[in-house]
Amino acid sequence: MPCIVIVGGFYGDEGKGKVIAYLAKKDNYSIAVRGGVGPNAGHTFVDEGKMYKVRMLPSAALNRSTRLLIGPGVLINPEILLKEIETFNASDRTFVDAQCGIIDQKHIEKDNLEDHLKGFIGTTGSGTGPANADRAFRLLKLAREIDVLSLYLEDVSSSVNFALDNKENVIVEGTQGTFLSLYYGEYPYVTSKDVTASGICSDVGIGPKKVDDVLVVFKSYVTRVGGGPLQDEVSREEAEKRGWLEYGSVTGRERRSSPFDMNLAKKAIRLNSATQLAITKLDVIFPETSGIREFNKLSEKAKKFIQNIEAETGVKVILIGTGPELNDIIDRRI
Ligand code: IMP
Ligand code: MG
């Protein structure tokens, strides 16, 4: 399994951060490379009681033997990146592509002041949309022009392709979720780029034939933050009762929620050509599964929930999240 791509199957916040951090610890990739939009994403994971959050670095950051790369399709906020490099003590193993676009203060202001973006779309306000617009205008500054990044510059696609040609293991990390894609989501309630597996591969510079597995991550229920349609959305009160009420990790906004959506899941599997699935937060919909690490120990209804997803989609669920800690997971590969 030299090259695995991980993407979200719904609207972001499926729990990719935890899944990636677990895999990185377990499978020891030589490279973790981040694709996706930029610091509008927030990946959270908890290891040995400590909570970590990354908006720029790959979520594999805890594994000290993994090189952390950011592909040229990703926008960088240098301030956020440098802080994370410090938090994870990762200055000797972080590399950003010289052609990554740079978010500056005016992009952030525009994202927060323009009613179309902040009010109507409900963006995260992190400046990614306006920066990608400037990139399309060919006006955006690139990482190679920024002094504080000079230490970290690399030709990321060459490094990734070289590693793959040498049969090293690489994990390619997507951000956001399939239905926030600029092309495949419900426009205009989308982010500023394609975030399906093909888009993520393009962000880091690998062709489709280099990918061995595409792991699509779904949460046991669906959440969405910001505007846009959400099939079978439950009321805030109902969400609170079910334990589904979450808050955005970047903006702190309340997330809207709905039950697991099989049709959406099937569509995400097609769009990403999923070969494997992960289902997170099973313990939220079936509290009795909390902390369980073996499939056979799940309750009958929890097993049925997973088996039904496999039967309906024809794709195997290899990882099941049963709690916030990295190790609160059922790994069905072992
Ligand atoms: P933008 O990506 O900040 O422009 O926001 C566009 C839409 O995508 C808004 O609805 C955001 O709430 C949503 N969005 C962007 N990134 C994420 C994410 O990482 N998780 C969840 N929603 C996101
Ligand atoms: Mg998130």
Image: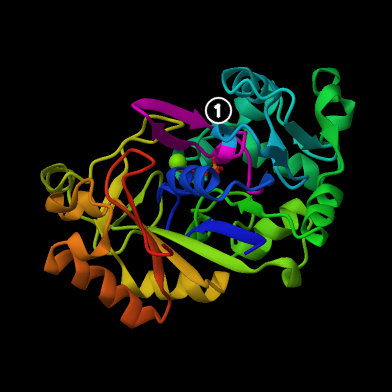
Q: Is residue 189 left or right of residue 244?
A: right
Q: Is residue 112 left or right of residue 76?
A: left
Query: How far across and down, in percent of the image, does residue 63 sit?
Result: 57, 35
Query: How far across and down, in percent of the image, does residue 73 sit?
Result: 74, 47
Q: What colour scheme has been applied to the protein in the rendered image? A: rainbow
Whether residue 185 is visible here, answered yes or no, is no
Label 1 secondary element:
helix
Which is more toward the observer, 175 or 115?
175
Which is more toward the observer, 42 or 123?
42
Q: Is residue 167 left or right of residue 190?
A: right
Which corner quadrant holds the C terminus? bottom left
**Is residue 306 covered in magenta?**
no
Magenta residues span 34-60
The relative height of residue 278 versus residue 26 in the rendered view (above or below) is: below
Which corner quadrant holds the N terminus? bottom right
Residue at 27%, 44% (x, y): give it. Answer: 323
Query: How far across and down, in percent of the image, does residue 84 sit?
Result: 60, 23
The amino acid marked with disc number 1 is Leu
Residue at 88%, 31% (x, y): give it. Answer: 144
- Pointer 1: what residue? 113
The relative height of residue 221 versus residue 135 in the rendered view (above or below) is: below
Whether residue 64 is visible here, answered yes or no, is yes
Which is more toward the observer, 47 or 305?
47
The relative height of residue 83 versus residue 54 in the rendered view (above or below) is: above
Name the residue furthest front. Answer: 334
Residue at 67%, 27% (x, y): give it. Answer: 77
Query: How far across and down, in percent of the image, does residue 146 sit?
Result: 84, 23
**Quarter location, residue 40:** top right
